[in-house]
Amino acid sequence: MRNIVWKVGLVGVLALGIFAGFAGSRQVARAQEMQPQTFFVQAGGLGPGNVEVLAFAPQSLQVHRGDTVTWAINSFHNVHFSEGPNELVLMQDVNGQQMPVINPAVGLPTIENGATYSGGDANSGLPAGPDAPKTFSLVMDLEPGTYSYICDVHPGMAGVINVVADDQAIPTPAEVAVQGATELLGAIGAGTGAMLQLETTEAQATDTGVTVQAGNGGTGRTTVNQFFPFSATIQAGQSVTWTIPEDSVEPHTVSWPAVRGQDVAPIAVEGGAPILALGPTLLPMTQSGAEVAAGESFSSGLFNPGQSFSLTFTEPGVYPYVCNIHPGMNGVIVVEPGA
């Protein structure tokens, strides 16, 4: 009988110890949860075959007041807490001449990387060259509520920060990272499927030449940064028209030779912020419909979904071209002697 009582008592002590340990671990976990945490959001994503996702992932995020949100800037994006999107390019008088410039409300930061965000308009600014930081962080000092932000460069690229009460449980940073990766992988998969279908595309004949598709549509926030088809053949004197589908989400250029990393050409202003004039990467150098001979350079500058750009090739030869803003997006026009 004593052995039974002793064993029952021992089981009770062990049970109390396990319960106490479990309760203690829950208290530690809760204490850790109450400490400020850092959550990562992917600003865009890249996949095989020049597939790109123009979205924040995860698109919606829950945080507590005092938590930090860090965006991984995976391409040419800004993070802008704003009431609405801003035009990327404006015409501005520069020394008596009208020039296309990057809208300062988009290109220039209004809050420092790592600062505390307490509401209102706040903009990371655009990445300033290849050595620009690849992340942008803000400490969320906000009342519970919903706070929206956008990328001004890519209309429709938007995210939401939901600040919740301190006692409300939220996903952990690790769970948030998995959610973001899942969203990106799903979008990349849709783009990869579209790419495989579009690679069988042939140039469409017109009365004056052929048309080539720049990029793709129909895949939501995913874009395939390729020309379809890669190679097109015409006769001297005929034209090629490049068209971006209306439901695409990304602009492109048609350019030769390639110019990389010169999106902006800052113009110093005494006592003020620089003027962000468009650089050779983005600046239109050639009018749509112009004639091009062998060995001549050309560049459409940025043109947008639903728009087209045309060139007439006057001499036989092989004419390579690229999109200046998407490395790996290139094509070739083969011009045969006329009949």
Image: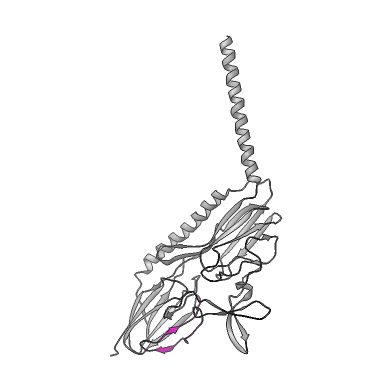
- Compared to 48, does 22 lie above or below? above
User: In the drawing, does residue 122 fall left or right of residue 335?
Assistant: right
Residue 32: give x, y in percent of width and height.
63, 44
Model colouring = one colour
Q: Position of residue 316 (x, y in %)?
A: 31, 87
Numbered-mark total: 0
In this orientation, which residue lies closer to the viewer: 145 or 27?
27
Of the 4 image quadrants, the one containing the N terminus is top right
Q: Is residue 322 left or right of residue 148?
A: left
Q: Position of residue 202 (x, y in %)?
A: 34, 75
Pick the quarter of the image with the C terminus: bottom left
Is residue 111 rendered to the left or right of residue 234?
A: right
- Residue, far front: 270
User: Measured along the vertical axis of the image, is residue 289 above or below residue 17?
Assistant: below
Residue 302 highlighted magenta (yes or no): yes
Image spot of residue 19 (x, y percent):
61, 29
Q: Is residue 322 visible?
A: yes
Q: Residue furthest top?
A: 1
Q: Is residue 207 something that shows in the picture?
A: no
Kindly indicate the quadrant of the structure image that contains residue 5: top right
Question: What secondary structure is the stretch in magenta mostly built from?
Answer: loop
Q: Is residue 254 magenta?
A: no
| Residue 7 image-quadrant placement | top right
Residue closer to the observer: 47 or 73: 73
The part of the chain drawn in magenta is 283-306
